[in-house]
Amino acid sequence: MGKSGQVRLDGDTIRYRSTLYGDWDLPVPRVRVVGEATNDHGPFADDYFFCFATGPDEWLEASFYADGRDDFLRALGARLGARLETGLCHSTDFASRVLWPPSLVGEPMFKFTELPPKGLLRRLLRIGRKMQTWSEPVAALLARQGQELDR
């Protein structure tokens, strides 16, 4: 297993193992949105992730660089009945896109809001942070699905 971990579809469960990012298991029926997101942390840290929304307040991430990625994408796409095609391979900044469900493919998964730098040194160097939240289309879909589950 490489430093970015390993990702695979094991029956009906997504399994991610990583000494760097932690381990998790996610049943495919809990997945509401699949997407990809990049940040500006490369080339010395992973800067590209698959994101799995499970509800209005939760998502899990797996490194794009994880072992087994291509087989995993094919297997998950087959399980979801869609072709999962990545599109942010050359991004070096904060970006995201939805890979599934089909009604949102290509839409941003997240919006990234610049937060003002804290501390004198960060202000002088203009080093800020980004807050990552759902994009409007994804937030609306997750809210609708949450309401349907509450009924």
Image (cartoon, rainbow, N blue to C red):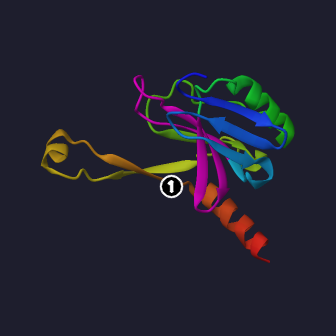
Q: Is residue 27 visible?
A: yes
* Residue positioned 68% across, 32% down in the render: 7
Quadrant of the image containing the N terminus: top right
Query: Image quarter for residue 106?
Result: top right
From the viewer's perspective, is 91 left or right of 150?
left
**Quick check: 66 above or below 120?**
above
In the rendered image, which residue does mark 1 sit on? 133
Provide the major secondary structure of the magenta segment.
strand
Query: How would you rate the neighbour count of disc 1 (Cα within 10 Å): few for under 14, some for 14-19, many for 20 or more?
Result: some
Task: Give the residues drawn in magenta, as a range.
Answer: 34-62
Residue at x 79% of width, y 29% of height: 74
Q: Is residue 115 above or below residue 149?
A: above
- Judge whether 59 appears above or below 141 on screen: above
Q: Secondary structure at mark 1?
A: strand
Q: Amino acid at mark 1?
A: Thr
Q: Residue at x 63, y 55 (%)?
A: 138
Q: Is residue 81 visible?
A: no
